[in-house]
């Protein structure tokens, strides 16, 4: 489907076992899931809106400002 629809970005396939593990570890209730993960692998936000959401850029920018500004932590 990714190739046929020419979807951009990183798309990962997870086996049913891996999906169940992620659901347990991160209390996920639905897949697909859009998450913001920092460079250390920490989940910053596990409930981002879809990439097409007009507010996504603003949400990510806000998180980056907080993460890069020691005064806000």
Image (tube, rainbow, N blue to C red):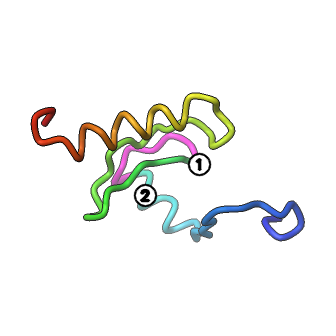
The disc, 1 or 2, on the residue closer to the chain's N-terminal end is: 2
Cα separation, mark 1 vs mark 2, equals 10 Å
Q: Residues within 10 Å of mark 2 (few under 14, many from 20)?
A: some
Please state which of residues 70 and 50 is positioned toward the viewer in this rendering: 70
* Pointers 1 and 2 in contact (C-beta within 8 Å): yes
Q: Nearer the viewer, residue 17 or 26?
A: 26
Residue 69 vs 6, above or below: the answer is above
- Write the start and end of the magenta stretch as one range: 24-30
What x and y, as percent, mark residue 66?
25, 37
How dense is the environment of label 1, judged by Cα within 10 Å: few (below 14), some, or many (20 and up)? few
- Mark 2 lies on a secondary structure that is helix
Pick the quarter of the image with the N terminus. bottom right
Q: Quadrant of the C terminus?
A: top left
The vertical placement of 61 against 20, above or below, is above
Q: Position of residue 65 (x, y in %)?
A: 29, 39
Question: Is 22 rendered above or below residue 58?
Answer: below
Residue 51, how many percent across, how many down? 63, 43
Q: Residue 14 is drawn in which quadrant?
A: bottom right
| 60 vs 37, nearest the viewer | 60
> Element under label 1?
loop
Residue 59 is tagged as: none
**Residue linked to disc 1:** 31
Question: Which residue is at 62% across, 39% downward?
Answer: 50
- Give the left or right position of residue 27, taking residue 57 as reference: left
> Where residue 34 appears, x then y in whole percent?
53, 47
Mark 2 sits on what residue?
22
């Amino acid at each position: 489907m990714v190739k046929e629809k020419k979807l951009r970005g990183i798309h990962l396939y997870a086996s049913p076992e891996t999906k169940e593990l992620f659901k347990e570890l991160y209390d996920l209730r639905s897949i697909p899931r859009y998450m913001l993960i920092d460079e250390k692998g920490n989940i910053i936000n596990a409930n981002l809106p879809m990439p097409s959401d007009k507010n996504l850029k603003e949400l990510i920018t806000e998180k980056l400002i907080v993460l890069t500004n020691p005064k806000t932590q």
